Amino acid sequence: MESTDARTAPAVIVAIDGPSGTGKSSTSKAVAAQLGLSYLDTGAQYRAITWWMVNNGIDIADPFSVADAAGKPDIVSGTDPAAPAITVDGTDVAAAIRTQEVTSKVSAVSAVPEVRARITELQRSIASAAGQGIVVEGRDIGTTVLPDADLKIFLTASPEARAARRSGELKGADVAATRAALIKRDTADSTRKTSPLAKADDAVEVDTSDLTLQQVIECVVTLVEEKRATK
Ligand SMILES: Nc1ncnc2c1ncn2[C@@H]1O[C@H](COP(=O)(O)OP(=O)(O)O)[C@@H](O)[C@H]1O
Ligand SMILES: Nc1ccn([C@H]2C[C@H](O)[C@@H](COP(=O)(O)OP(=O)(O)O)O2)c(=O)n1
């Protein structure tokens, strides 16, 4: 199929959800860049609010304290897939939100309904402002944030494949420990009461365990182009 010209194509909203290490960020960035769409990493927003809570002495184990503070930080996300950016109260936190400390606390913070309400509102306003369309990746985009998305993808992969990918990134990290931490976070994210990690009924499921990143990107680009052609 011929590629649709991004300048004349109708805006398309793509939701990509799935557990950690399935390839959401890499795939979403590449698809958005290739098709001239904006890109939003919603996990980075939950990491940013968690970073702020940690830095401001909020007791993460106390959902009431987290709820009280949820409205305080000003989180701004860039939407250029070639240069993903995120600031909190004007400070660039792109690197700071990837520490082990933030990773181990983000599930507790993102389970608090007041946090989700605030971040969900932010995500919807970013998506509605994206002129050409946007690829939004996370855990609850197809089910809750953008239930009317034009295309919903749910990425999966075996725990082994995901742990190997993640420990490769963490330079020499123990695969068994990485696998255990990843499963613990997925369980917390999938079992929370408010908008848990889940596949939307109308999402296309893609198992990436035995696919290269390039194959996953091509698969999603084809699905987006098919959708655009029928809009
Ligand atoms: N299909 C794939 N095959 C091999 N490695 C992959 C694949 N998809 C992603 N990766 C790698 O796995 C790691 C995690 O991918 P990422 O996109 O951050 O996943 P997620 O956003 O779902 O947590 C990255 O280092 C990425 O390059
Ligand atoms: N839409 C989303 C996105 C992320 N989260 C929470 C749950 C996740 O464990 C954390 C971090 O997400 P992130 O996508 O950065 O995680 P990984 O890159 O997969 O390690 O944020 C969420 O609750 N809802």
Image (cartoon, rainbow, N blue to C red):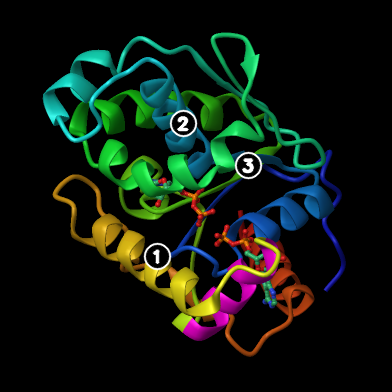
Say whether residue 162 is magenta.
yes
Residue 125 rendering spot, x and y as whole percentages: 48, 23
The label nearer to you, 2 versus 3, is: 2
Q: Which residue is mark 3?
A: 134
CB of mark 2 near ligand 2 (< 8 Å):
yes
The answer to which of marks 2 and 3 sits earlier in the sequence is 2
Q: Amino acid at mark 2?
A: Gln
State whether the magenta stretch is mostly helix, strand or loop.
helix
Q: Amino acid at mark 3?
A: Ile
Q: On the rendered structure, is 44 left or right of 196?
A: right
The Cα–Cα distance between marks 1 and 2, rounded to whole angstroms, is 27 Å
The Cα–Cα distance between marks 1 and 3, rounded to whole angstroms, is 30 Å
Say whether residue 196 is magenta.
no
Residue 167 rendering spot, x and y as whole percentages: 61, 69
Q: For the residues labelled 1 and 3, say whether their Cβ atoms are less than 8 Å apart.
A: no
* Numbered disc total: 3
Q: Label 3, secondary structure: give it.
A: strand
Q: Which residue is mark 2?
A: 123
Quick one: label 2, few (<14), some, or many (20+) residues within 10 Å? many
Q: Residue at x 58, y 60 (%)?
A: 24
Q: Label 2, secondary structure: give it.
A: helix
Q: Residue at x 80, y 48 (%)?
A: 33
Q: On the rendered structure, is 182 left or right of 110?
A: right
